[in-house]
Amino acid sequence: MGALVIRGIKNFNLENRAEREISKMKPSLAPRHPSTSNLLQEQISHYPEIKGEIARKDDKLLSFLKDVYVDSKDPVSSLQVKAAETCQEPKEFRLPKDHQFDMINMKSIPKGKISVVEALTLLNNHKLYPETWTAEKIVQEYQLEQKDVNSLLKYFVTFEVRIFPPEDKKAIQSK
């Protein structure tokens, strides 16, 4: 109901308002700097034929302009092609390893990817038992690429809290 009222108000006297806007004087050119206008007046007084040259239309140039035809097609950018190739969904899936952290209800994980819980688990296993949880075993277990696993083990570590006992017995006691 409100839309009808608003539409009626917007369209009220529309033709007269449009005609009034069209008949208004068009904006004039911006004023020139006084030094520029003095130079222009000086040049026109020295060379009066310039004023005629400015106003004259050159038929030869106009014919060149009429002959120009621009037909352009945007090339497909390489980024769009790469994005289209990488957006394809992986066809093979695997089941998550541990179902105890089933908060998100993941049914399957694409091959070559792991969940956050699995990443923390494999990092912790590698930290605790590096001789049994090698990069090769992780690749086989989680179906990942070797370079990804090597980077994961090299650049990521799990959070570890260590509390060091004070070496000096003269530590300040809290009151």
Image: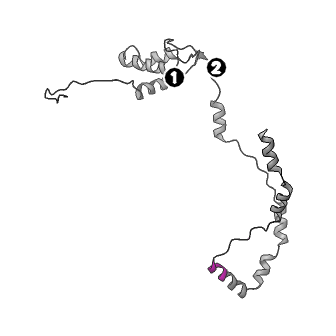
Which corner quadrant holds the N terminus? top right
Q: Position of residue 97 (x, y in %)?
A: 51, 13
Task: Report the residue that reaches farthest toward the top.
Answer: 99
Q: Position of residue 63 (x, y in %)?
A: 85, 66
- Direction from residue 163 to residue 55 in the image, left or right: right
- Direction from residue 157 to residue 101 in the image, left or right: right
Residue ID for mark 2:
91
Q: Residue at x 82, y 47 (%)?
A: 8
Q: Residue at x 80, y 61 (%)?
A: 21
Say what amino acid the circle numbered 2 marks. Lys
Residue 145, labelled with which disc? 1
Question: Splitting the image into 4 quarters, where does residue 36 fall?
Answer: bottom right
Q: Nearer the viewer, mark 1 or mark 2?
A: 2
Q: Position of residue 6 (x, y in %)?
A: 78, 45
Q: Earlier in the sequence, mark 1 or mark 2?
A: 2
The part of the chain drawn in magenta is: 27-38
The foreground one among 122 and 133 is: 122
Give the colour scheme shown.
one colour
- Direction from residue 155 to residue 24 in the image, left or right: right
| Secondary element type, mark 1 | loop
The foreground one among 81 and 19 is: 19
Question: Splitting the image into 4 quarters, where does residue 44 fall?
Answer: bottom right
Residue 94 painted magenta: no
Question: Splitting the image into 4 quarters, where does residue 19 fall?
Answer: bottom right
